[in-house]
Amino acid sequence: MSFACLEGITLQKLALALAASIIAVSAAGCAKPVAETPAQQAPVQSAPQQQAPAERSVPDMAASLGAPATLDPMDSARKSSEIATSFPAEVPVIEGTITRGKSQGDDAWDYELAAPAGAKSVAAWYLAALGNRGWGLTDVVDTSADGGKGYEITMVKNGAQTRITVTPKGEGSIVSVVLGVGAPVLQTQ
């Protein structure tokens, strides 16, 4: 028997099996339904869905920290020259002395600055300033529970995420910020 003849037999068997399957499916569609057993009648239970964490109010959280620092936001020209030329103008930065600023392309930035106000009031300033611009609060951690005296704030808006860490230093505080657009940014180099 030649190989070509063997291929024909294989194709014939495949065609017959396919035809038999089509006939069986068609016949099943026309048949009367079989009575269900009690086990089949029981409703299908899906796995319990996890509830989203309760949304936290930015104004309430800012108010719980007390009065925000009475410092103005840094102007756009200064942010562009001291942090990065691509830094988004609409993202507020508290007035202070920039000690580090860098970008990772046009979608991630980090900076550090020395602010002339205490950690609690600077944290309240960022909560209020970003909250007033439509940023939602993801988390606020008071690090004093772990022996620290600062705050870690995470906020999101339209695919952007920022993490702000405020720690006391002398009469003022050090502010470290990581900002990313389009994808959550958790850390930069």
Image (cartoon, grey):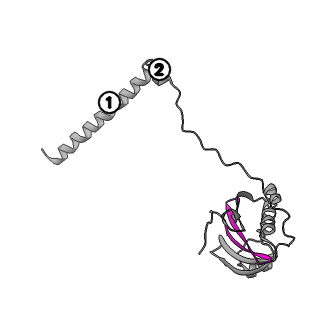
Q: Quick check: can you spot residue 152?
A: no
Q: Quadrant of the N terminus?
A: top left
The residue that disc 1 covers is 20
Circle 2 SS class = helix
User: In whole angstroms, how far apart are the C-alphas of marks 1 and 2?
Assistant: 32 Å
Nearer the observer, 30 or 134: 134
Label 1 Cα crowd, 10 Å radius (few <14 / some 14-19 / many 20+)? few
The magenta stretch is: 156-180
Q: Amino acid at mark 2?
A: Pro
The residue that disc 2 covers is 38
- Residue 188, position in %: x, y? 61, 72
Residue furthest to the right: 70
Is residue 175 inside the magenta stretch?
yes
Q: Quadrant of the C terminus?
A: bottom right
Circle 1 SS class = helix
Asked if 48 appears above or below 62 in the picture, the reply is above
- Residue 82, position in %: x, y? 74, 81
Q: Quick check: can you spot residue 52?
A: yes
Q: For this view, does 121 lie left or right of residue 151?
A: right
- Residue 80, position in %: x, y? 75, 78
- Residue 37, position in %: x, y? 44, 20
